Amino acid sequence: MIAEEYVPQIKIDSELISMKKDISVHESKIIASDVSAWFGNVQAIKNISMEIPEHSVVAIIGPSGCGKSTFLRTINRMHETIPKARVSGKILLDGKDVYEMDAVLVRRRIGMVFQKPNPFPTMSVFDNVAAGLRMNGVHSKKNIEEIVEQSLRQAALWNEVKDSLSKSGMSLSGGQQQRLCIARALAVNPEVLLMDEPASALDPISTAKIEELIYELKKNYTIVIVTHNMQQAARVSDFTAFLYMGELIEYDATRTIFTNPNKKETEEYITGRFG
Amino acid sequence: MSMIRYYLRRYFSSFMFILCAFSVVIALIPLFLIFYHTVSLGISAVNVDFFTKLPKPVGESGGGLANAIIGTLILVGIGSCISLPIGIFAGIFLSEYGNNFVGQIVRFLTDVLSGIPSIVAGVVAYTLIVIPMKHFSAYAGGVALGILMIPTVTRTTEEMLKLVPTSLREAALALGISRWKMTLRIVLRTALPGVVTGILLSIARAAGETAPLLFTALNNRFWHTSLNQPIASLTVFIYNYGVSPFEEWVQQAWGGALVLIVMILLVNIGMRTITLNRMKGNQ
Amino acid sequence: MERHFQKELETLKTLLIKMGSMVEENFSSGMKSVENRDEELAMSVITTDKRVDALEIEIDNTILDLLALQQPVARDLRLIIAAQKINNDLERISDHAVNIAQSALNLEKFEQVELFPEIIEMAKLTRTMLKDALDGFILLDAVLANNVLVADDTIDEMNRAVTRRVIQLVKENPSCIEAALEFIRISRNVERVADLSTNIAEEIIFLTKARIVKHHGTEMPDADKESPAR
């Protein structure tokens, strides 16, 4: 269910149309179909179905404990790494169910950035970014150097670290560490990037940098971001999904959700009248 | 009225402090006595010959315990070859895959193993290796030491691996790295300083064992020609010479004790240095 | 750090400026169609107004998006609020231009009655006011805006003069009453355009000085002077 974009009733000069937010009518990159997940006997998400178009940013919002992170982690099969965790339903990546593919290969195509920056502490900045590459069999030194530089540029970190690539990954500031983690995730060339509250541990300036970064990245990647900050979802995403108590309440274009949502619960949550 | 209470409190506080300080001093006395005696009695025996020559026969003076020093190193080496792979992999198993019934059993058995008296380990090695082979050997001694080292290495490895935060494991998995690669090349690498500390700890313990060697490696007054033969060791040497009636031998025993203590001290210093470096590296 | 939100604000400004020049153009076409009794020109004013209406809706939606999705503050917020009001004012100016064009069509039958020079003068001054208001928006120039506020008084004077002239005309020549009524209608519409231009000028002063200058002349006290920490 991809929302329809507003179309003016009367044709006006074409140059004036450029203002419209570029909601793509691209194909679906990921289709979640009746996805449920459990922690042991406790059901965390119930029958979630949604389509994520390619080269778009989809935000998932909702109150604490509503299952946003759990759903995100079912997409790249990280949920099952927790003992006694279980998933049902299908997640189609370009039409193929990820639960029928090799989990390791899925995670190379769908990358993830976590809430708290977690660079590998024993490695330098360079080695951190190269880690995924080296462990997946890439050994050519020149190749690795190129990819590391490209990834750091894409993460808007290159200029800040290009002279100190051999310093420990932990010597960077919080915002820089998070961008390092983004570069590390990008280095293995995923098609989709999942971000679990990537800016919640950062100060406002770093947060703004990361938001700009997401805006740039969506040209080349498909991004799904979980955030508890509604305004961030409004600023950054093309589509927004509102989850509550494990269920998908509403999923629509961001501008619709934030100007005129369909469901009462959505409006109550967004206007802060919840609870 | 409250003034009395106040002073009572103060004096009681001071009294407890003095008690604690006094206890510390008393506890350290044996340590200093040992050091003092060993150094003063042993230093005279230590000379270059000590490290290069074989023991001389009864009656002749001079000689050294080169073979004993090398012997200890070899025995600990064999023990390490056995215990390190077993211990590290067992530690990895317990930490990464051991949150279940099987893991509990393994942990329990490891704890039991760490509690057995060292002489029992010697008896086991005697039964398993010496008797079938029909002679004493360095292999047997190494096995005995290995048995003693395994629990320490296992438990330390497990604890150090558990200290590595889950977020690192998740970061690695999310990059599409397979589980075993993640465990070895990321988790183990992060925990490495701690694991090395555990290894050195077990080495230090093994180097100081005497009882298990008595009927596995036995002793050897000469160089061993193969590992299939009995081999000398510092601890057994000290034991034999220490109770002998010859004054020169007793002195050499003290010398041996000094060398042993210094070796273990160096290992401890090594441990501290690694830990300090790691803390500096994390900043 | 350049944020893509700033680019969107620039686009909003560009849209408004485009609308402004369309409306300016439409108003002078409207007046010209009356002066020259040009039927074709009058019709084109009416069609152009439809484009202006569509553009107004477009800008409204853009502003709604920017407010809902970007949570603007300070000067960004003032710009957007001013843009909203200017948007509405411009649309109404175009509506008045259409009314004037209507009058041109109605005056077809009365070719012989010349348009009062007073009305032509008024329209000229109004046109300058509108231009100044729009330039003031582009340049964020409060001085230009102030000129507009001052000129509005002259317009009111001129409107009253036209009414007197019309009364005189009707007294002299009662058969001209239909034309005269059209003249009053035109004059009133021009006066409204001047009024709306004044509104725009007030918005610009709000935008540049963060001061609310309503119903011109009566400036509200400075917000700073009211702060509790004194």
Image: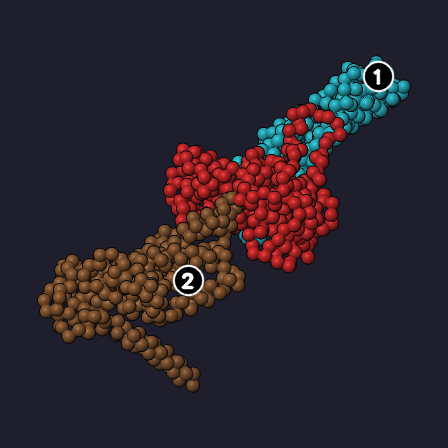
Chain colours: A red, B brown, C cyan
Residue A191 locus on image (x, y percent): 56, 37
Q: Which residue is mark 1?
A: C108
Residue A238 appears left or right of B170: right
Residue A238 locus on image (x, y percent): 64, 39
* Residue furthest out toward the top: C112
Q: Nearer the viewer, mark 2 or mark 1?
A: 2
Determine which of the numbered discs, if any, sits on residue A171 in the image: none
Q: Helix or strand or loop: what does disc 1 sit on?
A: helix
* Quadrant assignment, res C45: top right
Looking at the figure, which quarter contains the N terminus of chain B?
bottom left
Residue A238 appears left or right of C174: left
Tell how many labels: 2
At a point 87% along the width and 22% down the height, the residue shown is: C178
Q: Which residue is mark 2?
A: B155
Residue B61 locus on image (x, y percent): 10, 66
Which chain letter matches label 1? C
Dot 1: few (<14), some (14–19), or many (≥20) neighbours within 10 Å? some
Q: CA distance from mark 2 to mark 1?
A: 105 Å
**Where is A222 relative to C175, above or below?**
below
Which chain letter matches label 2? B
Residue A195 appears in view? no
At a point 46% along the width and 67% down the height, the residue shown is: B108
Name which residue type carries label 2: Arg
* Quadrant assignment, res B119: bottom left
Name which residue type carries label 1: Glu
